Amino acid sequence: MRPMECLSEENATRAALNGGCKGKILMCLYSFFGPITLLDVMANTIAYAVGGTWLYIAFTVLHPGSNVFYWIVQDVFGACMCITFLGTIKINAIRVAAILLTVAFFYDIFFVFVTPLLTKHGECSYKWWSAQG
């Protein structure tokens, strides 16, 4: 049996029928995730490595905003969130889409114009952080 072939429905069922802990674990994984391919494992490994590197830079580098990798990965994460949102939400009426767009618009206005009024010096926190170093 080739690597990752064990998580097909047929092989997981066969391993579960033969008994043993491995068969039960494989059947549980298959029922939860579905068929897992080598491409899935490679993509998840790369994604977790990039995400971990991004978090490491965010928490250890004094000014992560000056690192080009940090900003590019943050933009890619944002695009992935938007794509995931569009793939998950099914909007059946234009009225719902218009309401969501309007709420997002006012949310953005609040954070751009109102947040500086709520801080001590009338500045956004990113200006304070950039002035510190």
Image: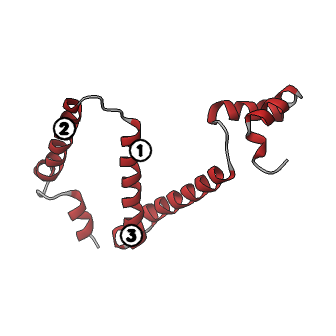
Please tell me whether mark 1 or mark 2 is closer to you in this view. Answer: 1
Q: With respect to residue 13, does 109 lie above or below?
A: below
Q: Which mark is residue 103?
A: 2
Of residues 106 and 5, which is closer to you in this image? 5
What amino acid does circle 2 point to? Val
Q: With respect to residue 129, does 66 lie above or below?
A: below
In three-dimensional space, the C-alpha distance between marks 1 and 3, rounded to whole angstroms, equals 31 Å
Tell me where residue 66 sits by quadrant.
bottom left
> What residue is at 16 percent from the left and 44 percent from the top?
105
Tell me where residue 33 sits by quadrant.
top right
The secondary element bearing badge 2 is classed as helix
In the rendered image, the quadrant that contains the C terminus is bottom left
Q: Is residue 19 left or right of residue 49?
A: right
Sequence-wise, which precedes: disc 1 or disc 3? 3
Q: Is residue 31 left or right of residue 123?
A: right
Please tell me whether mark 1 or mark 3 is closer to you in this view. Answer: 1
What amino acid does circle 3 point to? Leu
The secondary element bearing badge 1 is classed as helix
Sequence-wise, which precedes: disc 1 or disc 2? 1
> What residue is at 40 percent from the left and 59 percent from the top?
76
In three-dimensional space, the C-alpha distance between marks 2 and 3, rounded to whole angstroms, equals 35 Å
Q: With respect to residue 89, does 72 lie above or below?
A: below
